[in-house]
Amino acid sequence: MTNFCNSQTAEQIMNCCKRTLMRYRQQQRLLEGIHWGRNPSGKVVYNADLIRNLVMCGGNIDHPDHEKFIQMYLDSLPENQTRKSRKVAKRCEALRGTKQTNQATVAV
């Protein structure tokens, strides 16, 4: 669920300009570490999935559906998972990858 995008894509998702995105960050309408962050080179990147959900919730970060979506995102982060659930998640990822490879082989 971590689909990050640059400011141009975020502008398109939110139907606004770069200056508006900056203002939303300054006003805490977009939360650092949740809706946006910085990549290793220092550029601002946005969580496209959370921004889309925010738009669907009318731009209200306190909307119950958006709060649930944020919680799901936070729960999906590796640092918020127990060691056992990380192992299970890795197994599921491996199985999904194997399944997709098998499906691609069958399709060919």
Image: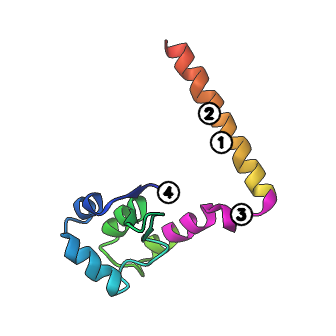
Identify the image quadrant of residue 98. Answer: top right
Distance Cα–Cα, label 1 vs label 3? 15 Å
Distance Cα–Cα, label 2 vs label 3? 21 Å
Scheme of image coloration: rainbow
Distance Cα–Cα, label 4 vs label 1? 15 Å
> Dot 1 lies on which element?
helix
- Give the residue at mark 1: 93
Chain part drawn in magenta: 69-83
> Dot 2 lies on which element?
helix
- Give the residue at mark 3: 81
Identify the image quadrant of residue 96. Answer: top right
Our reading of the magenta stretch's main secondary structure is helix
Q: Are the residues tagged 1 and 3 within 8 Å (C-beta)? A: no
Distance Cα–Cα, label 4 vs label 3? 15 Å
Earlier sequence position, callout 4 versus callout 2: 4
Q: Is residue 70 magenta?
A: yes
- Give the residue at mark 4: 2
- Give the residue at mark 2: 97
- In the displayed structure, 79 sits above or below 107; it is below
